[in-house]
Amino acid sequence: MSEINKPKVFFTSNVFSEKEIGSNKQISKNIREIIKKLWVELTQISEIKIFNGRFPSEDQIRIEIEEFNPEILGCHLSHQISAQLLEKSQIFAVSTSTVGYNHIQRTQRDNILFTNTPGILHETVADYTIALIMASLRNLIDLHNHVWKGQWSSNNKWDLDGSLSSVFNNKILGIVGLGEIGKEIVKRLYNWGIKILYYDLSQKEEFEKRFPLIEFKTDLKEIFRESDIISLHIPLNSFTEKLISRDLLKLMKENALLVNTARGGIIDFDILLEMLENKAIKINFALDVFPNEPIDTKTLRRLKKIKKNQPEIRMILVPHNASADANTRGKMNIIFLKNIINLIKSTNIEDLTDINLIPDHKKQLKNKEWRIFNYWDKK
């Protein structure tokens, strides 16, 4: 590819680079070597600019795009990419190093291709979800704090009925969304003898052949009414935003557990806090995601007050970390870079079929006038 035809690629974070994630020794050597090779290839076929930092503001991203004028944008979940910014640019593709892509707004014409990194993080998120469930069932956070704060004294040593908790195998687990992660949870827990219910837009009959004891529910209310543990594994979109509403929350059993490792916006969080504050519900919860991240001071104060007034409620709050397994993040970066390289090398629609386009764009691939056509015309 001649210098004059090299496309410009702008990365909104230096975390993607070979100097950062590509040199992180927590990641396996073979994965780091692949990342470095991909960067060599990318530098040969494109002109690259990398933001000097990890969390640019929207204004900083806008300024960089206006000055550099890229054709491909690489980002991740912490980078909000507005439709207005994309419309005013010559960007023909946005690649995100995430499975979800709700942080990128589509333009009115929706003619800019989006790629993501599916099929990688389901195992680590499933493990993490199970860890959160176990930590809540056995009350590990409160027990740790009990020791940490010096409250374990000779007056409350080990006792038969002290700090009682519960095990998994007498619980009903309700999974909302039986996609890659939901299925992985079933695979891990099925042989434990747990009763597993699930809700999805369609029944997964082929999967049920492998795991015949799981039970499909056509009504989400049944999941919330019957389950002792509810685990959310659905994307955030216009249909799922605030899906977990007052009507569903009020159905939950007393002391049931709500787990969210998906997206914070699928729970109507203000309603959840209000119901807890007013003691309209008494549930435990383990949250890895929040509507606004990082969690704001006002919300944190409300949560702390709920815990102070109702210390028996078990809360686990963690900072969007479910996929933070070192090799998983490395593999996501590999797919992310390959998506960008394959976009650059493409010359026609057929070349895009093996790229990880988001589902809507895959379906519409042959029916739209994409911006990338202009790039192909220049080659």
Image: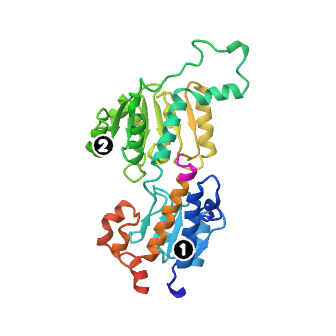
Q: Quadrant of residue 46?
A: bottom right
Q: Nearer the viewer, residue 195 or 372?
A: 195
- Majority SS type along the magenta span: loop
Pointer 2 local density, CA inside 10 Å: few below 14, some 14–19, many at least 20: few
**Is 258 placed above or below 322 here?**
above
For the question of whether residue 150 can be seen, the reply is yes
In percent of width and height, residue 276 lies at 51, 31
Q: Is residue 65 above or below residue 133?
A: below
Local crowd size for mark 1, using a 10 Å CA cut-off: few (<14), some (14–19), many (≥20) = few
Q: Which residue is mark 2?
A: 207
Q: Position of residue 151 (x, y in %)?
A: 71, 22
Identify the mark at residue 323; answer none if there is no mark. Answer: none
In which quarter of the view is residue 348 placed? bottom left
- Residue at position x 51%, y 79% in the image: 7
User: Where is residue 157, by image quadrant?
Assistant: top right
Label 1: which secondary element? helix
66 on left or right of 234: right
Q: In this rendering, is residue 308 above or below 367?
A: above
Q: Provide the secondary structure element on which disc 2 rests.
A: helix
Q: Which residue is labeled 1 in the image?
A: 41
Disc 1 residue type (three-letter): Glu
Residue bounds of the magenta highlight: 322-327
Seen at 36% across and 44% down, the residue is 178
Residue 162 appears at what percent x and percent y?
Answer: 60, 15
**As shown in the figure, which amino acid type bears the numbered disc 2?**
Phe
Residue 88 in the image: state x and y as whole percent. 49, 75
Which comes sooner in the sequence, label 2 or label 1?
A: 1
Labels 2 and 1 touching (C-beta < 8 A): no
Which one is in front, 49 or 314?
Answer: 49
The Cα–Cα distance between marks 2 and 1, rounded to whole angstroms, is 40 Å
- Left or right of 131: which side holds 141? right
Q: Is residue 278 left or right of residue 192?
A: right
